[in-house]
Amino acid sequence: MKEEHKFVKPYIKYVSIAAVLIVGLLIWSSWSSGLYEKYAISRQMSVAERGNDSEVNISKGAKYFNSQKYHEAKRVLQSEYRLNPQNLFLAYYFAITLVETGKEYEARTIFMSLYKGESAFKYDAAYYVALSFLKEDNKPATIEWLKKVPEGTANASKAKELIAELQ
């Protein structure tokens, strides 16, 4: 009987430690995901359908995007992006679908290209690079990219607020 007691005591200790770690991980994971959801932008993609095949497909992708069916949107927008990578509007929303579908690295390559250029999406792209790092729980890179969003731009206040939450 005493031999059983020696085995059970360490066993309970290890199970308790594992349970605490699992609960902590779940709380941390939902906190990080919650921050992404709280600070994400561009949940609506508006396009005007004009009639050519490319615009019809982009419009179809926008409908999926606006319904938060990101995997379907990604499939449609990806094929259009491959045909027309210089379309900055398309590049921006395609990159967002990549973030939403867990392809953060691929999204960053597009967002960084937008950031380096002179598009209207320059600082939104920097903000989304930060959010892509946030999804990967990379706080230093998230903060670094949030600091690239200048005062007076659309997401400056969100960037500042998120930096404060992360520090």
Image (cartoon, rainbow, N blue to C red):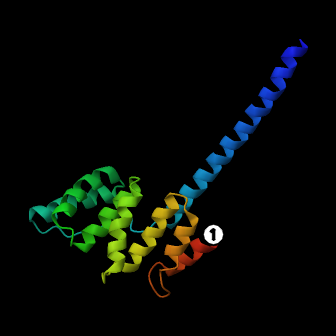
Q: Depth check: give the residue in front, 161 or 103.
A: 103
Taking the spot 36% from the left edge, 70% from the top edge, the residue there is: 111
Farthest residue to the right: give it: 2
Counting from the top left corner in percent of width and height, residue 139 is at 57, 65
54 relative to 16 in the view: left or right: left
Query: Left or right: where does residue 79 sit relative to residue 114?
Result: left
Work out whether residue 69 can be spotted.
no
Near-viewer residue (30 or 12)? 12
Q: Is residue 147 above or below residue 129?
A: below
Quadrant, the C terminus: bottom right
How far across and down, in percent of the image, does residue 147 sit?
52, 79
Q: Position of residue 79 (x, y in %)?
A: 19, 57
Q: Is residue 48 left or right of residue 105?
A: left
Is residue 99 toward the left or the right of residue 6 in the image?
left
Along the line of sight, which residue is nearer the eye, 121 or 48? Answer: 121
For the question of whether residue 112 can be seen, the reply is: yes
CA neighbours of label 1 inside 10 A, class few (<14), some (14 to 19), many (20+):
few
Q: Is residue 135 above or below residue 145?
A: above
Q: Residue at x 34, y 59 (%)?
A: 97
Q: Residue furthest top?
A: 1
The residue at the point 15 percent across, 63 percent down is: 83
User: If the image is split into quadrants, where does the N terminus sit?
Assistant: top right
Most distant residue in the bottom direction = 152
Three-letter residue code for mark 1: Glu
Q: Residue 137: horizontal and vertical position, in percent?
A: 55, 59
Could you say which quadrant of the image residue 10 lies in?
top right
Residue of label 1: 165
SS class of the residue under badge 1? helix
